[in-house]
Image (cartoon, grey):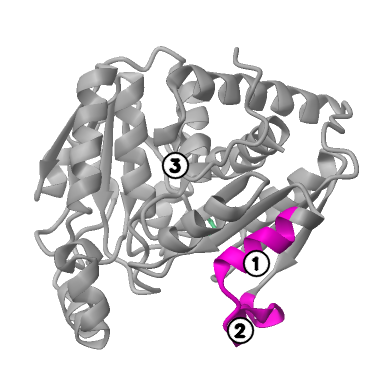
Amino acid sequence: MVSNLKGRHFITEDTWTKQELDTVFETAFDLKRKFALGESTRYLQDKTLFMMFFEQSTRTRNSMEAGMTQLGGHAHDLTPDKMQISHGEVPKDTAIILSRMGHGIACRNCFYGTGLKYIEEMAKYSTRPVMSLQDDMYHPFQGLADLMTIFEHCGKNTKNLKVTVSWAYAESHSKPLSVPQTQIMLFPRYGIDVTVAHPKEFPLSKHIVEKAQLNAQKGGGSLKFTDNMDEAFEGAHIVIPKNWGGFGFYGEETYLANEDACKAEMKQNIAKYKDWICDDRRIKLADKNVKLMHALPADRNKEVTDEILDNPEISIVFDEAENRLHTAKAIMSLTM
Ligand code: CP
């Protein structure tokens, strides 16, 4: 167990050692047990967290705010329209000021090509820990909750566990790359064999895939890719069918220079793959004890059918969502 995490930024698991992450999981399990028993965990009494949301959120916002309350502190729920960001105040000044007034800054900014850079700029100038609540590259809190849920359902020895991260059809919006990218970088560090399936127009970011391959080599897991969803489901212990936008097809420079054209083309490309759904036929290709995970919100009957999502023998998505609370509390209590 590591005991010197105060002040650490949490933007990606990749800057945290495995020993440090194991400390986070130990803390999250302890906090979950105490939450179930109704034990007090006021580790952040009188402390303040500033949360800045550039986008909508249900799980992230509420796990952080409820988490701060349960830890004895308070979270401010901020959006750019309520801040001077809307008049052009830069992340550097925002970070310096907020870090003088409280004990942590957390931010969701998923705009492709700029989100992570915005959060990293705040981290450069903040004297308090800065946490990513999801950006265009990473969703580190989701990654922690995912792995905690895998430990609960499959045991802590995850060597040789087969996890399929598959692109799936959706209509609600172009979802960021950050969830699958976090999963492919994190899971192989725990010996997990990850298969990623996606149509050719929906690749993940090249530099993230390269880092994830290195993590797999070092961590004893593996990472492979296919453009065939059926093949990816065969024998899988866990399937994660989830949409992501075609941002990686363009790369940041091209996308930012031609945003409207790229968005229009992405929409046309998505429409070609309506059959990329997790349904009863596909789930039968997987292991007989297969579990379904999804960060949520899901596009029901587009990414995954109700039949599978609501099947308590298969679906562990609500455990996964609940674990956002316990892992959020672990990171906040260890770093703030
Ligand atoms: N999974 C997740 O981040 O959910 P929200 O967008 O509701 O926070």
Relative vertical location of residue 271 with respect to residue 12 in this rendering, above or below:
below
Q: Marks 2 and 1, how far apart in space?
A: 12 Å
Q: Earlier in the sequence, mark 2 or mark 3?
A: 3
Report whether 23 appears left or right of 282.
right
Residue at numbered disc 2: 86
Is residue 170 visible to us here? yes
At label 2, counting other C-alpha atoms closer than 10 Å, the crowd grade (few under 14, some 14-19, many 20 or more) is: few
Report whether 252 appears left or right of 84.
left
Q: Earlier in the sequence, mark 2 or mark 1?
A: 2
Q: Nearer the viewer, mark 2 or mark 1?
A: 1
Q: Marks 2 and 3, how far apart in space?
A: 27 Å
Residue at the image position 53 percent from the left and 52 percent from the top: 124
Task: Pinpoint residue 88: horizontal percent, then vertical percent.
Answer: 57, 83
- Magenta residues (range): 80-99
- Do tag 2 and tag 1 residues touch (Cβ < 8 Å)? no
At label 3, counting other C-alpha atoms closer than 10 Å, the crowd grade (few under 14, some 14-19, many 20 or more) is: some
- Callout 2 amino acid: Ser
Which mark, by number, is residue 94? 1
Residue at numbered disc 3: 12
Specify the quadrant of the image occupied by residue 106. Answer: bottom right
Task: Pinpoint residue 230: horizontal percent, then vertical percent.
Answer: 14, 44
Relative vertical location of residue 162 with respect to residue 294 in this rendering, above or below:
above
Quadrant of the snapshot with the C terminus? top right
Q: Of residues 127 and 74, which is closer to you in this image?
A: 127
Q: Exactly how many numbered labels are in the figure? A: 3
Q: Of residues 66 and 107, which is closer to you in this image?
A: 107
Task: Pinpoint residue 221: horizontal percent, then vertical percent.
Answer: 24, 21
Query: Regarding mark 3 in the picture, which secondary structure is present there?
Result: loop
89 within the magenta span: yes
Q: Nearer the viewer, mark 1 or mark 3?
A: 1
Specify the quadrant of the image occupied by residue 172. Answer: bottom left
Query: Regarding mark 2 in the picture, which secondary structure is present there?
Result: helix
